Image (cartoon, rainbow, N blue to C red):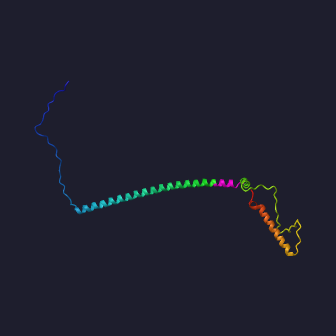
Amino acid sequence: MGSAAHKIMRDARPARVARPVLRLVRGGRRKSAARTAAAASGLFRAATLCLAILALAGAARVTFAAQAAEASMDAWELKAEVKAEQLAGRALQADRSALAAPSRIEAVACQTLNMARPAQIAYLQLPGEDSAPAEPTAPVAAPDSSGGAELLATLMDLAAGEAEVMLVGDVGLGSFR
């Protein structure tokens, strides 16, 4: 049920509170206001210098990072350009090989230039320096003098050379594969 009653008694005199022990400290030399201001100014300059150095280092880091990113983007663009040029080069090589095919050249010559394969191929054999001149197969009119025979032979050689150029043309100058 309930608890027993206690009697609270109060003392008439207050209890003593322990006081801290105080001691006397003598003051040292007083710093002058000028010395304190000079020290604060020096500390402020040092802190400002440190902050300036940190700011410059941060700016340099950002600048270098931006340059590296720009160089990386330029490298990717150059790689893409090189790849595109390689593809264009391969396409040009394929076109070149297709254009140089003898079958295509023959088709273009037949369709565009109205050329056809010859029915008969004739070769001209020119006398070399070692061999003797060939005898003419057809009789040549007898020259009146020796100067006329040389002139006629020269004219016949010129005509034969022109005929060869007209028959063979540029096709004879190229090599067939």
Question: What residue is rendered at 82% in x and 70% in y?
Answer: 155
Question: What residue is rendered at 30% in x and 59% in y?
Answer: 44
Q: Is residue 116 left or right of residue 92?
A: right
Query: Considering only vertical position in the picture, is 119 above or below 144?
Result: above
Query: Considering only vertical position in the picture, is 86 above or below 128?
Result: above
Question: What residue is rendered at 34% in x and 60% in y?
Answer: 49
Name the one closer to the observer, 46 or 106.
106
The residue range painted magenta reads: 92-101
Most common SS among magenta residues: helix
Name the one closer to the observer, 69 or 150.
150
Q: Is residue 104 left or right of residue 72?
A: right
Q: Quadrant of residue 119?
A: bottom right
Q: Is residue 111 left or right of residue 75?
A: right
Name the one closer to the observer, 108 or 95.
108
Q: Quadrant of residue 60?
A: bottom left
Q: So how many labels did they put on this image? A: 0
Give residue 59's position: percent from left, percent from top.
Answer: 40, 57
Q: Is residue 81 left or right of residue 25?
A: right
Looking at this view, name the residue that lies furthest to the top.
Answer: 1
- The C terminus: image quadrant: bottom right
Name the one closer to the observer, 57 or 43.
57
- The N terminus: image quadrant: top left
Give residue 78's position: percent from left, percent from top.
Answer: 54, 56
Give residue 95's position: percent from left, percent from top.
Answer: 66, 54
Q: Is residue 10 magenta?
A: no
Question: What residue is rendered at 39% in x and 59% in y?
Answer: 56
Query: Considering only vertical position in the picture, is 109 above or below 130?
Result: above
Give residue 88's position: percent from left, percent from top.
Answer: 61, 54
